[in-house]
Image (cartoon, rainbow, N blue to C red):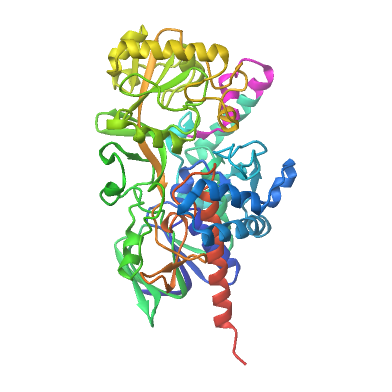
Amino acid sequence: METEVDVVVLGSGAAGLAAAVVAAKSGAKVLLLEKADVFGGSTAISGGVVWIPCNALMSGVGISDSKEQARAYLGKVLGNKIRWDLVDAFLDNGPDMVDFMHAHTELRLIPREHAPDYYPDIEGASTGGRSLDPQIYDGRKLGKWFAKLKRPIPQFMVFGGMMVGRKEIDQLLGTFDSPKNFLATARLLALYARERVSYGRGARLLQGNSLAAQLLKSAIDAGVELWSDCRIDQIELVEGRAGRVTLNRQGQAQSVRARSGIVLAGGGAAADAAGMRAHLSWPDHHFSMAPQTNTGELQKLAVALGASIDDAVVDPVNYAPVSVFREGSREIRFPHLFLDRAKPGLIAVNARGRRFVDEATSYHNFVRAMIAQPDGAAVPAWLVCDAAFLRQYGMGLVRPGIGSRKRYLAAGYLRKGATIAELARSIGVPEEALTEEISRHNRFAAAGHDPDHGKGGNAYDLHQGDPRHSPNPCLGPINRAPFYAVAVYPGDIGSTRGLITDDQGRVLDRERRPIRGLYACGNEMNSPMAGTYPGAGITLGPALTFGYIVGRSLGLQTRSRETPKE
């Protein structure tokens, strides 16, 4: 069987859906093929934040920005790995992408008034406005397609299927603190109960699930044809250009002809353990949060056509510390992004029982500090807290509150000691060192200043801390027995190594010439951030932007081809 369309998009994350929507809105007939049985890719399980400097929405929260500021900031962070053509394309087109999405699609983004970039003291950094959140979205608008939207990871839901935001977590924990909290919680639970009966989970969508849902609805409205369960076997050249995809769909061999172009947007290769092994510092102790379908097959097919993978990146993946819960044959991974590390009353120690990092730093930099420790002393690292911290904030998979922890203790995920010395023995670090380190940290907490590692010493740290705590929102004592620890390992939320492209998203061959008809965006293309992590949303921001650039280009090509020549 052969199908013929203008544009074939491979992958249904933010980049693929953006490319499909924009191309379709520009007049192209678009077919999107997804490897999994559901749509949304890694976007659907992400935090959903989109980083776009100079976007028009910033003025609504009283923040001004300029390309010059953003360029200065990225120049410092990316260093000598920077590709200015990609950075300039991102900065020039990102604001236009937001305007287009708001004018022509279902997607709505909301600027964070206060969201400091991850290097807040570097020239050009912003304290807010560049990071945008997708609006809370009613998944019921997808109709029958709601069942085809990839679910968030269970660890980021409560009551078996309800999504909640950061502010709502505090509200739920303080349900009985005020009539206002009680009524708000009651409304949320009543809505969730109704939706659980009809849909098997909550339809009130936040974060990346909301972003994926809005893009999926936009694709449906734009007339994009959507196929799931597609294994891509080959990309073929037709008359010197990438023009045909052969695939297996639900056990049936098929062929799709693309008149204008083929877009690679399958999410990259972070889940390809064998392929990533040579590029990771501790491959035997590295845990990726990328979907298991993100194994880089599309990159390999492009390489067969003459493309190359870009190794000129600072880091091969976007790092995040990950804890691992094992129970029988079951394994659950949890990324420690922002819920616990920055809060007052937690430290991270290495195998010597010593702190080695500002615990509130970005997840990417936290792992960089882990792997920089000599002899793997921080692989794993241990997050250490006391009973008061665990009850108020939780740690990893252990939720805050007074619920039972027996399951996590029995599995060894959560370690416990009646004294600090007993905890040290439980996690295998020197008792005297851990006792000294916690005592030293408690003195810093009382003073509100951490001279060793600077926790709570910059705008980013303070934003992640607890503003109700003083004198420093990130520093609190560890003194209420029993004491607890969770091991964290190097992990990631996606790869940065991708196909070498130009600033239009065209895949380049080994002589740096465009392979006609072949495009890449999202984690399939070489990281516009050069394997660094400047701020919240630096994966999804470029993914949407280059999806927009590619979709617009393919739409223009389609219209040009269809316009009769005089």
Residue placed at 63% from the left, 41% from the top? 126
Front one among 272 and 68: 68
Residue placed at 36% from the left, 55% from the top? 311
Res 190 → quadrant: top right
Residue 358 can be seen in this image: yes
Query: Considering the image in quadrants, where does the C terminus appear?
Result: bottom right
Residue 297 lies left or right of residue 528; in this view the side is left
Residue 535 lies left or right of residue 486; in this view the side is right
264 up-or-down from 53: above or below: below
Q: Where does the magenta region start and end?
A: 161-183
Query: Considering the image in quadrants, where does the N terminus appear?
Result: bottom left
Q: Position of residue 371 (x, y in %)?
A: 34, 35
Q: Position of residue 539 (x, y in %)?
A: 50, 49
Q: Position of residue 287 (x, y in %)?
A: 33, 38
Residue 235 lies left or right of residue 447; in this view the side is left
Q: Is residue 310 magenta?
A: no
Front one among 384 and 350: 350
Residue 52 can be seen in this image: no
Residue placed at 46% from the left, 40% from the top? 152
Q: Position of residue 401 (x, y in %)?
A: 49, 17
